[in-house]
Image (cartoon, grey):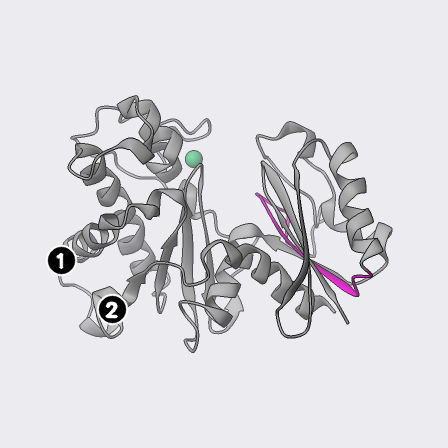
Amino acid sequence: MLYGALEAGGTKMVMAMIDEGGNQLKRQVIPTRTPEETMPEMIQFFRENKAGALGVGCFGPLDLNPASPGYGRILSTPKLSWRNYPILDAFIEALDVPVALDTDVNAAALAEWKLGAAKGLNGCMYVTIGTGIGGGIISNGRILHGTMHPELGHILLQPSPDDPMPEGICPYHQGCLEGLASGPSIERRWKISARDLPPAHPAWELESGYLARLCADAMLFVAPERIILGGGIMHQQFLLDAIRRKTAELLGGYLPDLSWGKSREEYIVPPALGDHSGILGAWLLSRQAG
Ligand code: ZN
């Protein structure tokens, strides 16, 4: 059987047909437009390629509570045409195969745990820091869900006293993590793209401090076995070391050494699957569905 995998993003839809062994046999990328324009193309791709099951890792937030009447819908996304769109039902009705839906970051967390940087552990936390900030948590071998899914990007932070833009840019909470540390917030604050900021720029001191706050809070809240930090902002390699150091400073020696696994370098790590974690995660979801 061939599995369909969809990484549904705010700007592009990545579709793939993947075999039992995880080999990507076919791949197609289309821009994300309205559901009316985009869905028929995706349905055609999976139908033509005879997907026996489909896994969807989708931008969120999503209603993932099976008891909810809105189960399988996209919630308060800034992409207005997709707001309230019942993406799960639309695929089930059109394809008549088992379909599994989760967030893009939960899918990526699943892939990094099964196949990548957290392979062999019981769980991990995966966070992507780019245009937005999102994350997924695997705990005791399962994706962590509650009433919905974690929204790590919107944890509420105390802005640093050194922050020249402490008000942040999140339309919901201003100075949440995404409002203070996403790519667009860096650009708004310093009037320069994160990509062009030199390593010695004070922007990175601030950025590593905010991301360390997330790591320290995560260790206190869910004690993940490993923290994986990816996304465009993390392409700045020097950031990881600063985040490790500041996370330890914030924790003040409170947690036992055991909390860090073997070492800080092995605890807060980059992803191992690069750009493939999303689509491989969708494949893993499709296998759970099929
Ligand atoms: Zn927010």
Residue nearest the viewer, comparing 202 with 176 = 202
Graded by Cα atoms within 10 Å as few (under 14), some (14 to 19) or many (20 or more), the crowding at tag 1 reads few
Q: Is 126 included in the stretch rendered in magenta?
A: no
Graded by Cα atoms within 10 Å as few (under 14), some (14 to 19) or many (20 or more), the crowding at tag 2 reads many
Label 1 element class = loop
Residue drawn at point x = 58 percent, y = 44 percent: 59
Amino acid at dot 2? Trp
Residue 241, labelled with which disc? none
Label 2 element class = helix
Query: Against 46, is 165 above or below?
Result: above
Quadrant of the rendered structure where residue 209 is?
top left
Question: Marks 1/2: CA distance?
Answer: 13 Å
Q: Nearer the viewer, mark 1 or mark 2?
A: 2
Amino acid at dot 1? Gly
Task: Give the residue number, with chain letter if any, for mark 1.
Answer: 252
Query: Against 194, is 281 above or below?
Result: below
Query: Against 46, is 13 above or below?
Result: above
The span picked out in magenta is 50-65
User: Which numbered disc flags the more N-terminal residue, 1 or 2?
Assistant: 1
Residue nearest the viewer, comparing 185 with 155 = 185
Decide if ligand 1 comes within 8 Å of the CB at mark 1.
no
Instruction: Please provide percent x and percent y for residue 51.
Output: 78, 61
Quarter of the render that holds ligand 1: top left
Task: Give the residue number, with chain letter if any, for mark 2.
Answer: 260
Q: Is 55 included in the stretch rendered in magenta?
A: yes
Quadrant of the rendered structure where residue 270 is?
bottom left
